[in-house]
Amino acid sequence: MPELPEVERYRQLAERTVDRTIASVVSPDPWFVKGGADGPALDRALVGSRFVGARRIGKLLLLEAGRGPTVGIRFGMTGTLVVDGDAGIEQLLYSPHRHDPAWDRWAVRFDDGGTLVVRDPRRLGGVSLDPDVSGLGPDAATIGLARLAQALAGSAAPLKARLLNQSCLAGVGNLIADEVLWRAGLSPVRPAASLSRNEVRRLHRHLGRTIDDLIERGGSHRGDLMEQRHPGGICPRDGTALARTTVGGRTSWWCPAHQR
């Protein structure tokens, strides 16, 4: 399930396409092209141009073309990026262990023979031109302490739900949220505004460290808590039986002993 670490891997992979001339755009699935655009519009905007940069805001990958337009790619739950046959992530947690060519939803072909392909078995992602990013909050990998405190202040929502709200904090998904809160020793069901200044500092510190760890390890599914997120799982820190709770519409696993 692509969260911030996976999309950061995709961004790094997409850098291989910079300064390569786009020969054609392939849009076999009209539904996959979003935001009022269509395959011909993408073709007109991109063919003959080159990508000049690859950046990311939360889970959104942005490829900047030399003529001015920006391609936005969202990966849903099972989307992967493949450049010249190399996948940014070999296997996602909830993705099939096989490949069907019909899952290649959108592609760019370069004049050197290489390709950039968006592969999405469950068809939950999408590609758009000049996507509106105004509704996204600060990127979770770079958010400052003051901005994080501001995002939590005054909110009666459960802490985990607030972290998952992309308009408050862009990039945190279900697995990252559980891992960060477990490391920080904070309950996912506490009201977000109930954190003390020291707890916000602790959360901020663990948020940054966790994201760095998961990017280096290769994905949000590589957390320390991950293997115990199941019925009968125990806390890797103190051996307490993990609690299973639904927070913000997502299944959450946490330790009632040390997460307060």
Image (spheres, grey):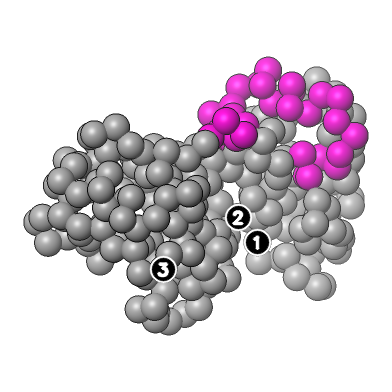
Q: Secondary structure at mark 3?
A: loop
| Cβ–Cβ under 8 Å for marks 1 and 2 | yes
Q: Is residue 237 visible?
A: yes
Q: Position of residue 60 (x, y in %)?
A: 49, 45
Residue at mark 3: 29
Kindly identify the residue that appears in the image at 29 percent across and 32 percent down.
Answer: 68
Q: Position of residue 210 (x, y in %)?
A: 59, 42
Residue at mark 1: 226
Category of crowding for the residue at label 3, using alpha-carbon neighbours closer than 10 angstroms: few (below 14), some (14–19), many (at least 20): some
Q: Pick out the residue farthest to the top.
A: 146
Question: Considering depth in this image, is 40 or 186 the residue closer to the camera?
Answer: 40
Amino acid type at image mark 2: Gly
Q: Quadrant of residue 116?
A: bottom left
Q: Give the answer, above or below, for where 37 lies relative to 92.
A: above
Kindly identify the residue that appears in the image at 15 percent across and 55 percent down.
Answer: 23
Q: Give the answer, above or below, for where 57 lies relative to 103.
A: above
